[in-house]
Amino acid sequence: MDQLPVLLGIGGVVLLASVLAVRVSIRLGLPSLLLYLAIGVLLGEAGFGIRFDSPELTQSLGLAALVMILAEGGLTTRWSSVKPALGAGIALSTVAVVVSVAVTGAALHWLLGLDWRFALLWGAVLASTDAAAVFSVLRSAGIGKRLTGALELESGINDAPAYIAVVVLAEGATVDWTLPLLVVYELATGLAIGLGFGWLGGLALRRAALPATGLYPLATVAVCVVAYSSGQLLHASGLLATYVAALVLGNSRLPHRSDTLSFAEGLGWLAQIGLFVLLGLFASPGRLLEAVVPGLVAGAVVLLLARPISVVLAMLPFRLPWREQAFLSWAGLRGAVPIVLAMIPLSQGLPGAQRLVDAVFVLVIVLTLLQGATLGPLGRWLGLARKSEAHEIEVDAAPLDELGAELLQVRIQPGSKLHGVYLSELRLPVGATVSLVVREGAGFTPQKTSRLQEHDQLLVVTTAAVRDAVERRLRAVDRAGRLARWKGESGR
């Protein structure tokens, strides 16, 4: 009990330092997860001397944090954004995972001399993209919604098949004709559980009369956690159940929806911070030096061979342009998830598992620096970035929920065809209006004769019913100007 104030104080200082690290990472152009890992390493045996070397506890806490991250990702993902990319997202999270495991395993079997089962285990650990990294990077990169939706769905769903593959290979289970049936059962049951909890949870929350507004966000997250627990207890995919339940809840008419999404975002940040600091605390700098070569080899295989091949094969039915396939190949961001998955064989005492964990640490650091710094410029170079995309604003005001209204913010970038368009020529659907224009730091209420200019910021108020149509119209005019409809531009 005497140590409790000290522990709480240390925890508070670490949390504050991690929050400030977000600001520092933005200024330096570095992904914040690297700073969280650095904080953990600084606290660990090589810094302040805090010793933490329990793979079992690291695995358990890592999975708990992953559940929170998936819940936040599902709650804040708009179905209208990912629906056009549903097929591509599912293909990336299933077919691409299988191909990536096979290609990575075969390459590492030849390059590192690993036996086949352990080589495939490396491939399974590295097959999963990281939800936290994808959600935080892509939503600020200005990439078109089809690609963003596909990558968000992939990162939310592919943890499930990757986790199943790691468990099967780590436990040495017999690989026969029943294995595909087991995988199908776990994924299908997890999907059904997620859909059921999401629908029933949304229905219950709409009918409940809770005594305080703050209880609704807590109840919403609790539904997602129970979905995970139910999936695991039924030997199904709890991770898939979590994400699907959160996706259904986030797109239903939740009471105090804006408060719930703000709470989920904060909880997701807390989970990310705690997870990466914990993993940094577990890491041993001395061992990491020995894992540099295998980590770099594995990273090169994943980035330059396995990911591109898996994307090309998974996208064959969708005939995506080469530019989009190139971006998808480069955007397979790795983060904490592969490290958490690598803890599974380590906690089971599998020979060589420590080498795998250390190599994954090195790989994650290198790929995060490389991909995180180049993803935005690559999108712009390929002509896929659209900086004037409308995005939702979180407002801490319950009347918007009661009115069924939403706020969108649009920034008109240089080169946008919105420049020079009169407000009357926007022809937004009935139920939407531009309520404010901010130009050179000064705001004014626009009239029909107001003419939009580059660098203007627009505040659009819209009903929930026409929100998607408003976004499509804004995108169409952004691309083709006031005659977008005549030019066949729909904004999709």
Image: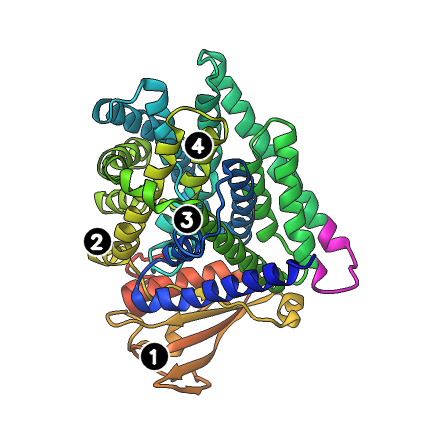
Please tell me which residue lies in front, 326 or 400: 326
**Left or right side of 419 for 139:** right
The residue where tag 3 is placed is: 149
The residue where tag 1 is placed is: 452
Q: Which residues are magenta?
A: 204-215
Applied colour scheme:
rainbow
Q: Position of residue 283 (x, y in %)?
A: 40, 45
At label 4, the amino acid type is: Ala
Toward which corner of the image does residue 112 lie, by quadrant?
top left
The residues tagged by marks 2 and 3 sit, at their Cα atoms, a distance apart of: 18 Å
Q: What secondary structure is found at the residue carrying circle 3?
A: helix
Q: Please, is residue 151 above or below residue 460 in the view?
A: above
Quadrant location, the N terminus: bottom right
Image marks 1 and 3: residues in contact by CB distance under 8 Å = no
Q: Would residue 437 be visible to someone looking at this image?
A: yes
Image marks 4 and 2: residues in contact by CB distance under 8 Å = no
Query: Is tag 3's residue or tag 4's residue first in the polypeptide sequence?
Result: 3
Toward which corner of the image does residue 36 lie, by quadrant?
bottom left
Q: What secondary structure is found at the residue carrying circle 4?
A: helix
Query: Is tag 4's residue or tag 2's residue first in the polypeptide sequence?
Result: 4
**Label drawn at residue 140:** none
The residue where tag 2 is placed is: 382
Q: Please, is residue 381 above or below residue 289 in the view?
A: below
Decide whether residue 216 is among the magenta residues.
Answer: no
